[in-house]
Image (cartoon, rainbow, N blue to C red):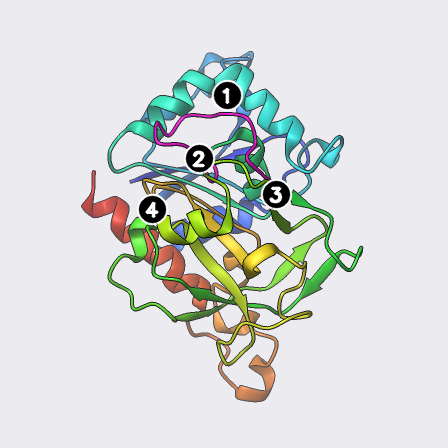
Amino acid sequence: MNVAILSIEGTNCDEELANCFRVLGAYAEIVDLKQFTKEVEDKRDVRNLSDYQILMVPGGFSAGDYVRAGAIMAARIKSTLGKELRDFVRTKGNLVGGICNGFQVLVELGLLPGNKDATPTEPQVALTTNSSAHFECRPTYCRWEGGRFLPLIGVPPGDVYYFPSAHGEGKFVLSGKKGSTLKELEDNGQILFRWVDPEGSRSSYPWNPNGSEGDIAGVTNLEGNVFGLMPHPERSFTSFQLPNWTRTGIGNGRGDGYRFFESIVQYARTHP
């Protein structure tokens, strides 16, 4: 089972993300966008998107986050890899995910919340500057809403995950256009995670660190095979990444990020 971690200049969470999948037994490779578009000198470095089952867009500051966070990377993907990405999303069993900056990229591509054809479109929502007007780097919790996300189908709604946050433009704002209102996302089961406090209840700042509408921390497309979330599950993969691990004495166990990525790998293995 092959995982591609898509990178360009400025992405900086790719190695941590790849390591999560490697620990879980998947073959994870960090692939520069130019390798997919064959813009490399050595032909041995060329990669084909169709050879992978999972495509992940990692966090960081792609292209310096100039213009808007994720906008330049999304424009480059759409102009050079658009057809291959469309075919990839439409292939049964494939998954596309974006974390933090990667979520911003998928929103800019129009893949999230997406349309019934699962193809890149114009942006339907925005991930904009946090309500605090500050970069928020803090412990945060998310609640599984029991939606369409294929790897978590069967997990009871209300399950809480500890995923820390680190972003300056994570405020999820809906445009109000068809397919992107809060009620439509709720009715369609497209809300992946909501920001909650440690007890699992919806709350205000700092537990909702950015002021997102509807406390939305992550969404999926209509088919449930494209997802994005603002917090970083790769930063809670092991228990020693928890802020209280020195007090609890649990330093080598599995964190909530482990069980999240494990569900993704298990789904991909059983849906080739």
Q: Secondary structure at mark 1?
A: helix
Magenta segment boundaries in residue numbering: 112-126
Q: CA distance from mark 2 to mark 1?
A: 26 Å
Q: Residue at x 23, y 46 (%)?
A: 269
Q: CA distance from mark 3 to mark 1?
A: 20 Å
Say which residue label 2 marks: 114
User: Which numbered disc covers residue 101?
Assistant: 3
Q: Nearer the viewer, residue 108 or 48?
A: 108
Q: CA distance from mark 2 to mark 3?
A: 17 Å
**Does residue 26 show up?**
yes
Closer to the chain start, of discs 4 and 1, is: 4
Say which residue label 4 marks: 26
Q: Residue furthest right?
A: 133
Whether label 3 touches label 1, CB < 8 Å: no
Say which residue label 1 marks: 35
Quarter of the figure with residue 87: top left
Find residue 20 and report its horizontal and vertical position in percent: 44, 54
Q: Secondary structure at mark 3?
A: helix
Find residue 111 and report its horizontal and vertical position in percent: 47, 33
Q: Quadrant of the C terminus?
A: top left
Circle 2 crowding by C-alpha within 10 Å: few under 14, some 14–19, many from 20: many
